[in-house]
Amino acid sequence: MDLFFIILGVLIGVLVLVIFIRTFTFGEVVPDFEQGQVFDPQPERVAERLSRAIQCQTISFSESQPPDAKVLKELRDVLEKNFPQVHKICEKQLINGDALLFTWKGKNTDLKPILFAGHQDVVPVDENDVAKWTHAPFSGEIVDGWVWGRGALDMKNQVVAVLESVERLIESGYQPERTIYLAFGHDEEIGGIRGAAKIVEWLKEQKISLEAVIDEGGMILSGLLDGVDDPFAMVGIAEKGMATIDMSLEMNPGHSSMPPHHTAIGVMSKAIIRLEDHPMPAEPEMMLPLMRALGKSLPFVLRMAFANMWLFKSVVISEMRKNPRGDASIRTTTAVTLINGGIKDNILPPSAKATVNFRVIPGECVADVLEHMRNVIKDERIQLIPNKEIIWDASPVSNTDSAAYMILKETIQKTFNNVPVACQIFPAATDSRHYYAVCQNVYRFMPLYMTSEALGGVHGINERVEIAALEQMVQFFGALIKAFDKDF
Ligand SMILES: [Zn+2]
């Protein structure tokens, strides 16, 4: 008996030791790069240029109502006036009418080009919300160090910052080694089929294969994780797919005075609750790159849990499930978004319909979603009808061991005070997914300092960007373009 307890004690001791060693060795070493600026700052100039761009109301209202061609022309005129060097030195093309493509020829045609992607369109502002804006949404007002308006974060800021950095580089007499494309679609908010997809088609026709694509996506955030105060950068290396599934059920109509135990609405409700209570399987390993990058700045318990996932996987999953952002980062999400049923208060509903929107992680597909739904709902009366127009797979996953990724990561750290840089699966759709046809290294990153609170402006009320942060974006793109001069 004594021997049993001795062995048990030794085993527990070893286990605790392993857990602690793994915890303390978990995480990347924080680099110590010297910080630098490529340009003399001209924050007022770039702020003014962004303000002008915001004033053009390039709104994508719906799939069938892309931005007005006249307004897109107005934006092009604003860009032409404000970025004279870009328009003088780079070749400008309009693809499919309104998508903008600039080609800045590099000195060395043996090197593969890089492409900076962006979109000219913005989402609409709800009429009922206009009065809630502190400054009118398309005023582009510059007040107390901020530029206000729709597109200030998504993503006229990035389009203008990239153009501004190229403008300044040309002014300084610089020419890149690699050819650089600036590609700005005009319908990203409604799928990018008219813009980015057509730009990619053109690139394919020219047999152009790209070294890297940089588009919007992850940012430099603070306050996103409980217990982690320091900011960190996230680079989207893939994005989730989309699967919208309609559920439909028909039952006999009749008088409501003698109802069955469950009407069509009741049966549908039960199915909905089952779907919400049984999410798609969790993959907490998806969080590992972020947790490794954060390493020592993680609270001890979180660090221990992620360092010892073999033991604490279920703890990690239940912690992540506690908030929507955490949950969305480890699994395919389920959101019931539409419901319909019934015709009159005293008639049993002849049918009920509901729509579920899934955001699908790489590695899963629509067939997996349908199988999961059938297994969970367990009711053959409910028909599942995939909405073919709102279904696409998750994107491929970009390389993180490529030279392009290392350059991106280093440039982030050299510009933004050695922040930890982590890759992530971006939860929303962007134009980036179209570019995999011509590039394996597609990275979604907006070099912008944000608090999780300010993130609410994206597609929301009071969208605005701080001028100092906008200037920093210009500095970053200048540094990145120069860093890509390297031959690798
Ligand atoms: Zn966007």
Image: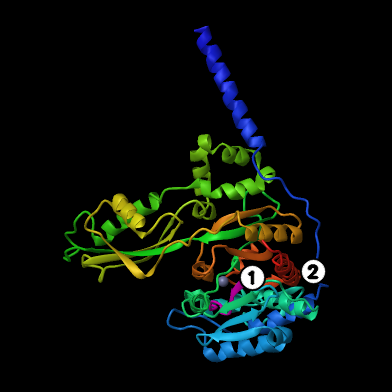
Q: Residue at x 53, y 7 (%)?
A: 2
Give the amino acid type for the residue marked by disc 1 in the picture: Asp
Q: Residue at x 52, y 71 (%)?
A: 431
Q: Residue at x 69, y 79 (%)?
A: 50
Question: In x, y percent, where is residue 234?
Answer: 62, 57
123 in the magenta segment: yes
Q: Which residue is mark 2?
A: 38
| Residue 150 locus on image (x, y percent) | 61, 77
Q: Position of residue 173 (x, y in %)?
A: 79, 79
Q: Is residue 255 above or below residue 147?
A: above
Q: Residue furthest top?
A: 2
User: Would you say 54 lies left or right of 1 here?
Assistant: right
Callout 1: SS: loop
Of residue 485 and residue 469, the one placed in the foreground of this image is 485
- In primary-sequence order, the first of circles 2 and 1 is 2
Most extreme residue toward the front is 110
Residue visible at 53% across and 42% down in the picture: 316
* Residue in the foreground of this view, choosing between 270 and 185: 185
Q: Main secondary structure of the magenta part?
A: loop
Q: Is residue 232 left or right of residue 321?
A: right
Q: Is residue 459 visible?
A: no
The magenta region covers 116-125
| Quadrant of the image containing the C terminus | bottom right
- Label 1 neighbour load within 10 Å: few <14, some 14-19, many 20+: few
